[in-house]
Image (tube, rainbow, N blue to C red):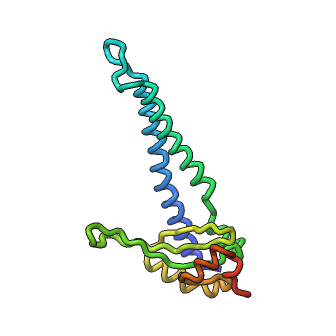
Amino acid sequence: MLNPEILRVIRQSYDQLYRANSVGHYGFVIIGLVIVACSFFTGPAGKPINGDPIFVFGIGFEIAMIGVGAIALARKNRVDLVDIINNRPTDIVWVYRQVNKATMVGVTYAQFEFVVFGLINKQQVKVRLPGNCVQALLQEIPQALSHVTLGYNAEHAQAYRQDPVSLLHPS
C-alpha cells in the first residue's frame, strides 16, 4: 500500500488537472453559444449585423459541439487512479516518470513532472506531481506495486503497445 499522503496528493493533482481541462471545454461551449446568440441580432433596419445569420449560427453551433464532445470524452476517459491503486493494483502494469519542458526561443521557462501509470487496458493516466512527491512515489512503487514495470525505455513502450500483460512481474 502506498503512503496515504502520496495518495492524497495524487488524487488532488489528478482532480486539479481534470478541472483545469474542463474549464477549457466549457469555455468552448460558452463561446459557441454566444456566437449562436449573435446570429439572431439585427441592426436598426432589421438586417443582420453579423453577416449571414445561418453561417454565424452554424459556426457557433460547431464550436459549442466541440466543447460538448470534449467534455463527454474527458468524462469517459476519467479514471479513479487512487481506487485502482488501492483496490485493483494488478490493473497497473507500468509506471514511469515523464518530464515536460516548456521552451520559447530555445529557453526553458517551465518544467513539469508527471508520473504516468500504464493500465492493463492500454490507457495511460498522467498525474502531475511536485518533484519531491515524484521521487517519493517512485521509491515506494517497488515495494507497494512489486508486479509493475518501473521506468521508461523503448522496449517497455513497444511491449505495452503490443501486450500490456507482458510487463507484469510475478509477485
Quarter of the image with the C terminus in it:
bottom right
How many numbered callouts? 0
Residue in the foreground of this view, choosing between 18 and 119: 119
Residue 98 appears in the rendering: yes
Rendered-image quadrant of the N terminus: bottom right
Q: Residue furthest right?
A: 170
Query: In the rendered view, would you say 40 is above or below 162?
Result: above
Instruction: Please name the residue shown 50% across and 55% down the image.
Output: 19
Position of residue 49 relative to residue 141, above or below, is above
Q: Nearer the viewer, residue 143 or 30?
A: 30
> Residue 109 appears at what percent x and percent y?
30, 70
State the residue lying farthest toward the top: 45
Q: Position of residue 54 (x, y in %)?
A: 46, 26
Foreground residue, 87 or 159? 159
Q: Residue at x 63, y 62 (%)?
A: 79
Q: Percent x, y for residue 133?
A: 48, 78
**Residue depicted at x 36% and y 25%:** 51
